Image (cartoon, helix red, strand yellow):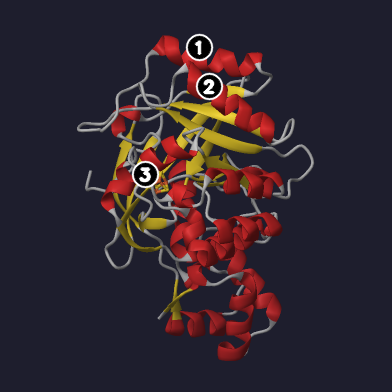
Amino acid sequence: MINLLNFTLPELTAWMQNELGEPKFRAVQVWQWIWQKMARDFADMSDVSKACRARLAATARISWPEIAGLEESRDGTTKFLLRLEDSALVETVLIPSDSREGVRRWTQCLSSQVGCAMGCTFCATGQMGFERNMSMGEILGQILVAREHLGDKRPDWPILRNLVFMGMGEPLLNLTEVMRALRSLNNDKGLNFSPRRITVSTCGIEKGLAELGESGLAYLAVSLHAPTQELRARIMPKAARWPLDRLLAALDSYPLKTRERITFEYLLLGGINDGPEQARELARLIHGMGRGKGKLNLIVYNPAEGAPYAAPDEARVLAFEQYLWKRQITAIIRKSKGQDIKAACGQLRAISL
Ligand code: SF4
């Protein structure tokens, strides 16, 4: 039986026309039930004719990922372990942030692959190896699970505000399904996330980068983590196969929207990439891209048990940040959330909770 979560709206329309003889507007109704009203049972689709619902039930299903475990951090960060239909496990994380008025909003960190082939040396997912790509339905299913958990039922004013593809996997190595997911997210009859609310984070994959840029469907974050090719090759050996100077040249011509900037993620690893020499190199590199094109997120490394690196010294972190500000570079130290439940950057591993 077909899982309707795997259809984009044009695919659902064609399938319902060809297989069920239903008009186009019926597909839009079903699509809204699936993504906006979060129906899992065709019987709930009250404005769809009984005959159509019966035909749908006979040929299709709506299957969400199943929650296999859930952990909540002291800071409110919530990590879900999800079981996919073939029993593969992935993790997704909900991160809270409170406005000045005390209104809580959430960002969801999405996985795009089961495991990851990139093998970055600081990353728990990278140490799992690669199992398989996730389908569009599995990628977007993570959002349905999170919205239901949050009781987030209003597509016009959702409390799940932002999505970041920073969970398990390298999204640009699963380009086909990630692009289908982005197109579906953009649809105002569905989850209705504008590109401003979505960030795709990559360590830099040549083919995928060009296609993502041309699509304009999401903002871009690049996992840099080292300011020189030599150091990058040490800590991200596979990512560094696309040499840093060529990655930067591609980013230089990356199409940006008005006021959009590329976010560079820089994980500070104690004694490895957190010294004044690296800060200088990093400033040179960001300035080389042209004024105002890039901004930096400095992430403080959270060593898990048996981790290969140490946390950076606080004084060095502050000195690193201050040096960049002095060079007129926007650099923000991102407090890692969810460390106590291993939900922070680089800690996702998908083992039973
Ligand atoms: Fe893969 Fe990202 Fe981890 Fe690198 S940091 S191994 S790209 S999940």
| Mark 3 residue element | loop
Residue 109, numbered circle:
none
Q: Is residue 170 above or below residue 222?
A: below
In the rendered image, which residue does mark 2 sit on?
A: 279
- Give residue 101's position: percent from left, percent from top: 63, 20
Q: Which residue does the image show at 53% across and 49% down from the upper left? A: 204
Outermost right residue: 258
For label 2, the crowd category at 10 Å Cα-Cα, with few meaning under 14, some 14 to 19 and many 20 or more, is many
Q: Which residue does the image show at 68% across and 83% down from the upper left? A: 23
In the rendered image, which residue does mark 1 sit on?
A: 319
| 26 displayed left or right of 35 | right
Quadrant where the image shows the N terminus: bottom left
The kind of residue tagged 3 is Cys
The kind of residue tagged 2 is Ala
In the rendered image, which residue does mark 3 sit on?
A: 120
Disc 2 vs disc 1: Cβ atoms closer than 8 Å? yes
| Mark 2 residue element | helix
Please name whichever residue, 159 or 302, is drawn nearer the observer in this view of the structure.
302
Task: Determine whether the beta carbon of the residue marked 3 sits less than 8 angstroms from the nearest atom of ligand 1.
Answer: yes
Q: Earlier in the sequence, mark 2 or mark 3?
A: 3
Residue 11 visible in the picture: yes
How many discs mark residues in the rendered view? 3
Q: Earlier in the sequence, mark 3 or mark 1?
A: 3
Please name whichever residue, 104 or 254, is drawn nearer the observer in this view of the structure.
254
- Give residue 274's position: percent from left, percent from top: 44, 21
Q: Is residue 203 above or below residue 296?
A: below
Q: Earlier in the sequence, mark 2 or mark 1?
A: 2
Marks 3 and 1, how far apart at CA: 26 Å
For label 1, the crowd category at 10 Å Cα-Cα, with few meaning under 14, some 14 to 19 and many 20 or more, is some
| Mark 1 residue element | helix
